[in-house]
Image: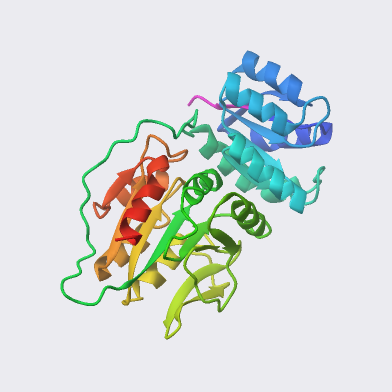
């Protein structure tokens, strides 16, 4: 088996040594080099042709963000950030993903984490997934209209209220930014979002998207009435579900067991929406590893009043989650990322 070539970029000699040891204990990886700043990392990326890189933000000479921008111009390479859990660290993480990083791992305890082995399994998994990522990422390809079939059968009854739900994982922050910033503030429905992400980062993600989008974007709270023109992101570490009331849809947060390793879980959100018979749903699955959302889509479709949209392979950074729901043959549309917002509006404004 050909090993995955990794370049480790960190200004701490201790961190470079520890991460190298963690990776070389795993038979899938070969650490082909290390770099202590962004300038050195760019040179070694060109020389060593790594399949994937780890990257710290705070470095001398050229920091991680500056290096990442240059790397994506000259040699697009999958990158996993090692991120601080501070507010500034979280903001830098989302900037990094906007510039092209595939994913991140939160350091357990600051810049030099003596206990980095606590996140060993997460780091190994994310590096393996990132090494398979679809790069370079470019969502501005030509748009082609595709025939639309609708499973929202109305007949002569009173039109139902509507809600949008989105599930995503690896590559999701960038995908969410593209979709949400294309939606108008006047969108007449609420939007519920599950992004696989640890506690401490979802609030920063919501704040960042709120600044960039015309709609309002919030981290969801428990027992919150959903309002049109607002997106609600499940907090890291909590499942997000909804219940119907006379006032509308109400959020429910809980810390029950993870579902297939995920909390929040896309399946959990989708399945709760399936049990809201007075609402039509537009369910969207974007980039991500694995199959979270597939059982939820199956359940929603079995109850009717659901349109399912999957991101297409051409733009998905990781095609796992969209591919899984497409395999059910229950998807109404498969669209490149830059056209997803347009299709959401098509259904909610009808």
Residue 156: quadrant of the picture: bottom left
Q: Locate residue 94, reporting x and y percent.
A: 64, 45
Q: Residue at x 20, y 69 (%)?
A: 154
* Residue 113 vertical placement versus 30 (above, below): below
The answer to whether residue 349 is magenta is no
**Among all residues in the image, which is located at the extreme top?**
47
Q: Residue at x 44, y 35 (%)?
A: 139
Q: Residue at x 71, y 29 (%)?
A: 66
* Residue 19 vertical placement versus 236 (above, below): above
* Residue 233 vertical placement versus 326 (above, below): below
Rendering colour mode? rainbow
Work out whether residue 334 or residue 346 is closer to the camera in this orientation and state it.
Answer: 346
Q: Locate residue 119, reporting x and y percent.
A: 67, 49
Q: Residue at x 42, y 61 (%)?
A: 165
Q: Which residues are magenta?
A: 1-7
Work out whether residue 182 or residue 334 is closer to the camera in this orientation and state it.
Answer: 182
């Amino acid at each position: 088996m050909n090993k995955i070539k990794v370049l480790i970029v960190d200004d701490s000699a201790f961190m470079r040594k520890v991460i190298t040891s963690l990776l070389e204990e795993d038979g899938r990886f070969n650490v082909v080099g290390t770099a202590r700043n962004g300038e050195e990392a760019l040179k070694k990326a060109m020389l060593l042709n790594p399949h994937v890189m780890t990257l710290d933000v705070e470095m001398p000479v050229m920091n991680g963000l500056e290096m990442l921008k240059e790397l994506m111009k000259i040699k697009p390479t999958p990158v996993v950030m090692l991120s601080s859990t501070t507010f500034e660290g979280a903001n830098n993480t989302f900037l990094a993903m906007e510039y092209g990083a595939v994913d991140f791992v939160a350091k357990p305890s600051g810049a030099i984490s003596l206990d980095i082995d606590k996140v060993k399994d997460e780091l190994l998994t994310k590096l393996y997934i990132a090494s398979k990522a679809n790069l370079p990422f470019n969502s501005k390809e030509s748009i082609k209209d595709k025939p639309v079939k609708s499973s929202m059968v109305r007949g002569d009854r009173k039109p139902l209220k509507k809600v949008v739900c989105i599930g995503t994982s690896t590559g999701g922050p960038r995908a969410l930014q593209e979709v949400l910033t294309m939606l108008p503030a006047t969108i007449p429905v609420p939007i519920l979002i599950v992004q696989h992400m640890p506690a401490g980062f979802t609030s920063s993600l919501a704040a960042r998207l709120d600044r960039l989008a015309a709609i309002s974007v919030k981290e969801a709270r428990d027992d919150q009435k959903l309002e049109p023109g607002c997106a609600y992101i499940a907090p890291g570490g909590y499942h997000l579900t909804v219940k119907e009331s006379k006032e509308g849809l109400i959020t429910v947060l809980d810390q029950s067991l993870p579902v297939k390793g995920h909390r929040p879980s896309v399946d959990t959100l989708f399945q709760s929406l399936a049990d809201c018979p007075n609402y039509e749903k537009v369910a969207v699955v974007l980039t991500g590893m694995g199959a979270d959302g597939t059982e939820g889509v199956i359940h929603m479709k079995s109850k009717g009043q659901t349109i399912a949209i999957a991101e297409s392979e051409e733009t998905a950074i990781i095609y796992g989650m969209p591919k899984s729901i497409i395999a059910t043959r229950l998807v109404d549309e498969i669209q490149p990322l830059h056209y997803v917002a347009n299709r959401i509006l098509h259904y909610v404004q009808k």
